[in-house]
Image (tube, grey):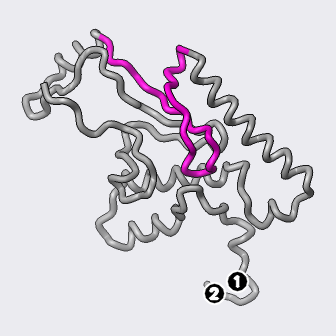
Amino acid sequence: MELPQYADAHKAWKYSELECKVDPLEEIVKEFEGGNYNLGKIAFLKELGRAAYQNPLSSGPVRRQREKKEIVILGQAEIRAEGIAKAELQDPPSHAVEVRVCPVCGANSLVVFQHTLSGDEFMDMVLDYSPDEPIAVEIGQKDVYAVECVCCSFNVDFQLKNPREYGLPIEDYWRTEYPSR
């Protein structure tokens, strides 16, 4: 509905621009308009949108209207999130191996979690072996299994494809090709 009195109403409810410049709502609408939609892409876009609403670093009109000291607190939130993300790297049980810039909030607080394939896990894969899906992994192989932003809570795991496979301008997270045996 397009009513003049509500022309700027989206400013009251819509999230600020994402660091990656993707508008999740627009992209979801575009994906469904084609008729042949990809549920994985929809799931990835929904997570971008969910995290956008959780983003404490948003810079929309509401934030500009706040008092200056509140903006300083928001700046401290980013510093705090980046510190927590770096601390994750020092905690061996967490499997954190790297910190990247988050595609939603832009803070350097996207923690990358990696898993090393153990001998037992390799044997489980062998027992589940199917000739149609050859095993192309080795014991000790390291793979990223999830990324999570400590600041805005953006969180995806390997069950979704890499963002670029969905046509999104976001750095890939998972390995898609494995060395042949």
The magenta stretch spans which residues?
A: 92-118
Which of the two labelled residues, at mark 2 and mark 1, occupies the earlier sequence position?
A: 2
Mark 2 to mark 1 CA distance (whole Å): 7 Å
- At label 2, counting other C-alpha atoms closer than 10 Å, the crowd grade (few under 14, some 14-19, many 20 or more) is few
* Residue 10 magenta-highlighted: no
Q: Nearer the viewer, residue 60 or 2?
A: 60
Residue 44 in picture, x, y percent from top left: 45, 51
Q: Which residue is mark 1?
A: 7
Q: Quadrant of residue 101?
A: top right
Determine whether, in the image, residue 90 is placed left or right of residue 7. left
- At label 1, counting other C-alpha atoms closer than 10 Å, the crowd grade (few under 14, some 14-19, many 20 or more) is few
Compared to residue 91, the image places residue 113 above or below, namely below
Q: State which quarter of the image contains the C terminus.
A: top left
Residue 37 in picture, x, y percent from top left: 33, 63
Residue at 44%, 57% in the rendered image:
169
- Residue type, mark 1 in image: Ala
* Residue 102 magenta-highlighted: yes
Residue 65 in picture, x, y percent from top left: 86, 64
Determine whether, in the image, residue 21 is placed left or right of residue 42. right
- Residue type, mark 2 in image: Glu
Query: Label for residue 2?
Result: 2
Residue at 63%, 36% in the rendered image:
150
Residue 80 in picture, x, y percent from top left: 74, 34
Q: Secondary structure at mark 1?
A: loop
Extreme bottom residue here? Answer: 4
